[in-house]
Image: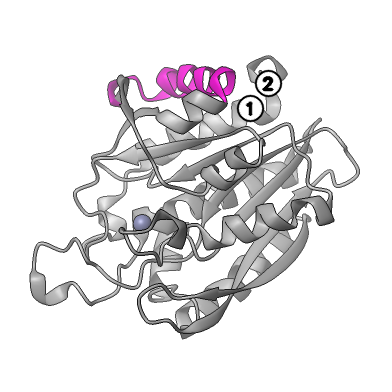
Amino acid sequence: MRTIEKQVAFGPRIPGSPGHAAMLSWLVGELEESGANVSRRPFRMTNALTGEKVTGTNVVASFGSNNRDRIFFAAHWDTRAWADQDPDSTKRKDPVPGANDGASGVAILLQLSRILAENPPAIGIDLIFFDGEDQGSYADPRTFSLGARAFVASAPLTGFRPQFGILVDLAGGKGVRFATDYRSWRDARALTDSVNAVLATYLPDRMELGRVMQTEDDHIPFLDAGIPCVVIFGSGDPNWHTTHDLPESCSPEVLEGVGNTLLEFIYMADKRP
Ligand SMILES: [Zn+2]
């Protein structure tokens, strides 16, 4: 929760904004403190609504860099420029504070980095923080996940060949529920089943596994490239893309359940398909 509050205090993390720049240096500093190999991966992106060209930066923190046997965890760190779902129509051009939508996933991954620093894993771990996830136009899904697309496009060059990945998004909100994501299930079924089973042990009351939903998120470019990646996506947050996406709308219980789920994939080899 403190790590969410810290990010929201930077202000909106919209690519090109002062809050975005401050958040980037803080994030890199936090990760370097955990002893990870940290790299910034800048890319050029165009803001779908303004047409403005800005630099986005994906951040990768690697633990056990020499281990060829690797898995990754990912979240987006940018926040949406427009609260277009705000109940008050006069606020729909204001930025989203991004507590659940952005900061929660980053907080979960940063907590993993602190645990990894103290408990070196037997498998190589990459924590990936995507930029440019949430600046898109709903009319065109390809205007979302710009950082993840740039990252996957560079994978043949950078030699990124993980066994699989797990993405977390909106996974810390008070009211969220976890349904089955269609593309995760279709393209990475064994991993989806395993993630759902572990998540259900921590957050049994929040599972809606019989419900299938389509999530446009940063896992799609990986699946399109044949890299298994499932999303843990909290649906049903009433504050999604509004000015009310604030720390008080997040839940320590949900953050802990999702974080513990990820830890099982790091430290318990039998959970990995
Ligand atoms: Zn969003």
| Residue 267: image location, x then y, percent | 69, 26
Q: Is residue 41 visible?
A: yes
At a point 34% along the width and 64% down the height, the residue shown is: 137
Q: Is residue 2 visible?
A: no
At a point 38% along the width and 74% down the height, the residue shown is: 12
Tags 2 and 1 touching, CB below 8 Å: yes
Q: Residues within 10 Å of mark 1 (few under 14, many from 20)?
A: many
Q: Amino acid at mark 1?
A: Phe
Would you say residue 197 sits in the magenta stretch? yes
Q: Residue under label 1, please give it.
A: 265
Q: Residues within 10 Å of mark 2 (few under 14, many from 20)?
A: few
Magenta range is 188-206
Would you say residue 51 sits in the magenta stretch? no
| Residue 7: image location, x then y, percent | 45, 66
Q: Amino acid at mark 2?
A: Met
Please, is residue 250 above or below residue 180 in the view?
below
Q: Main secondary structure of the magenta part?
A: helix
Drawn side of residue 159 relative to residue 79, left or right = right
Drawn side of residue 54 relative to residue 88, left or right = right
Per the model, the C-alpha gap separating discs 2 and 1 is 6 Å
SS of the residue under disc 2: loop
At a point 35% along the width and 76% down the height, the residue shown is: 49
Q: Residue under label 2, please give it.
A: 268
| Residue 105: image location, x then y, percent | 48, 50
